[in-house]
Image (tube, rainbow, N blue to C red):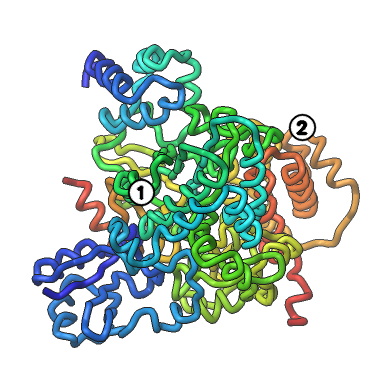
Amino acid sequence: MTRVFISRDMASVALGADAVAHAFADAGCEVVRTGSRGLFSIEPLVEVETEGGRIGYGPVTPDDAARILGGNHPNRLGDVAALPFFAAQQRFTFARCGIVDPLSLADYAAHGGWTGLDIARAAEPQAVVDTLKASGLRGRGGAGFPTGIKWQTVLDAPGGTKYIVCNADEGDSGTFADRMLMEGDPFCLIEGMAIAAHAVGATHGYIYIRSEYPFAIQTMRDAIALSADRIAPFTLEVRAGAGAYVCGEETALLDSIEGKRGQVRAKPPLPALAGLFGKPTVINNVLSLAAVPFILAEGADAYAKVGFGRSRGTMPVQLAGDVRHGGLFEVGFGITLGELVNDIGGGTASGRPVRAVQVGGPLGAYFPPSKFDLPFDYEAFTAAGGLIGHAGITIFDDSVDMAHMARFAMEFCAVESCGKCTPCRIGSTRGVEIVDRIIAARETEPARAATNDGTLGKALYSRAPDRIDVSLEAQTTLLRDLCDTMKYGSLCALGGFTPYPVLSALDHFPEDFGAAAPVTEAAE
Amino acid sequence: MGSDEAKALIDAWVGREGAGRDRLLPLLHNVQDAIGYIDDALVPAIAAALNLSRADIHGVLTFYHDYRRQPAGRHIVKLCRAESCQARGGAAIEAIAAERLGVAMGETRRDGQVTLEPVYCLGLCAIGPNAMVDGRPVARIDAAALDRIAIEIAA
């Protein structure tokens, strides 16, 4: 019987993979449902097992089954791993994703699974933490805090009960790496959490998954049940979110697990010392924990030798939005933004020129193509007024209106604010109003010379609507002032980072806000 | 489901899964999965079952976008509004969806047949605009796809 491999990833299913799988089953094939390889322009992808290895075809429809099994189909890709998109990657974390049956313990063990856990459990907890420190792994959720140091704090914290919490509340638009890993290689995350538990002395862990990811929730629950004996005495459970973006913030996530409103806590105390139920808690992103089995199995040096500056190891970059070859591209830090967008992603799907890319989700900055020489590195992005975040890159063509995107950033913050701090709760709504005034003014008011006539004061202290200075200049000044308040006055990254997309849009694309285009554009 | 049945459901769930404070979100999910929404009239029963105040339950119930306090339509279409889908023409699709399905974003159609809701990212960001139709993910939504969805929800 011919064996074929078809992805069960939510993205593949959204493109029709279930119908394709049925067609191959009806044609008498043994269908193995895998995770996704991660290149969505070739999904639904079918790989047929032959004596010479797996031969890929994609994209395919259910009607293609007979021709593919006959070995004669125009979308024949050959060895999928040899395609340029995959050959150029360094897959440490996603090595198994798209290849194995996600819920097969035999597949997992055959592809190097549990090696890291066995090595860790044979070592002292301090030695495991030291290995993590030596690897240089930094928090992949966005903040980039050294994982080993976080674990050391929890290991050193007094108290018998400690928890491991996995933050799988991947709410950023343009990111899907957590989802793909949980659906495509769930045991990898479980192994990483079990290693963390051994390293810090925890006995129970939680995986908090957003409710928008029903496939990931089901796959993780199944995988936990299957691997319970292997990770014992450590135990795990999945908690489903309830549609609150702010629960991706670690302290809001902890409150949500505790059964409360997902409101951000003031720090200190750090979760490492007083986290879930007030106990010392390791809270890490999916990708941080999923990188751990590789580090233990292959050694800290194997991980640390890849990378750029203080950003060590690999980053699963996600190419999204209006992109020709979108998907997951795991590569060492240091690759430039331009290489990712143009060489790997192949530019826009619409065929129009790239105008802007947003890096790091709804709280990340927009960059124009003139910034495409930026290396993918935490420090380089911070210096450029942005952030890597969860490494999602959303590409926009030249039809985008950046004032609308700035408005959306404020609107999203208003919808998702937890309401605890004023700059975020009220500032975001005021931000929407200001951008609305700018959009209204830019239609009617030609760009005019600065008057410097106390416009901020007029705009700030007006109370009656007819006394608000609605000129472009006054409102733009007010918007910058508001962003300053939100950035430095908010309790967490939601209010604090919403200014990134707003200010970067304003700085790099002033022509969309009614001002003159930047002169720097011509120099490049 | 009558209110006595709903209370029995809550008590049975708590008897099985425990009555700790951290059980609140899973319990609310369970009630909504079983009944379709969480009626305000059930708040006292939930509060009693978990030994929490009614205000506390109300606070949690109204904080999370997922929990419904009114019944939804027989079909639920969630359309992504986030940046990556916008980059692929999501805003225009939103307008077409409202027109083809005959209901404004965030509303339930008067005949109770369909609810159209925004969702902020389904994690299918390279193949948008995306939607969830009764829990089934659908990618590359265009006018033709919306016509198919409109037929599907007429059933």
Identify the residue shown where x is 18% and y is 70%.
Answer: A62
| Amino acid, disc 1 | Arg
Which image quarter: residue A442?
A: bottom right
Using the image as rendered, state which of residue A35 and residue A516 is in the foreground. A35
Q: CA distance from mark 1 to mark 2?
A: 65 Å
Using the image as rendered, state which of residue A265 and residue A450 is in the foreground. A265
- Quadrant occupied by the C terminus of chain A: bottom right
| Amino acid, disc 2 | Arg
Please report, as a chain letter, where disc 1 is located. Answer: A
Question: Which residue has dot 1 on it?
Answer: A230
Identify the residue shown where x is 32% and y is 59%.
Answer: A102
Identify the residue shown where x is 54% and y is 40%.
Answer: A201
The numbered mark at residue A463 is 2
Q: Is residue A271 left or right of residue A182?
A: right
One can see residue A246 in this view: yes
Using the image as rendered, state which of residue B150 and residue A231 is in the foreground. A231
Identify the residue shown where x is 67% and y is 71%.
Answer: A308
Q: Which x, y percent locates residue A31? A: 19, 66
One can see residue A363 in this view: no
SS at circle 1: helix
SS at circle 2: loop
- Tell me, yes or no, whether dots 1 and 2 are on the same chain: yes
Q: Which x, y percent locates residue A467? A: 78, 38
- Quadrant occupied by the N terminus of chain A: bottom left
Q: Which x, y percent locates residue A328? A: 46, 68
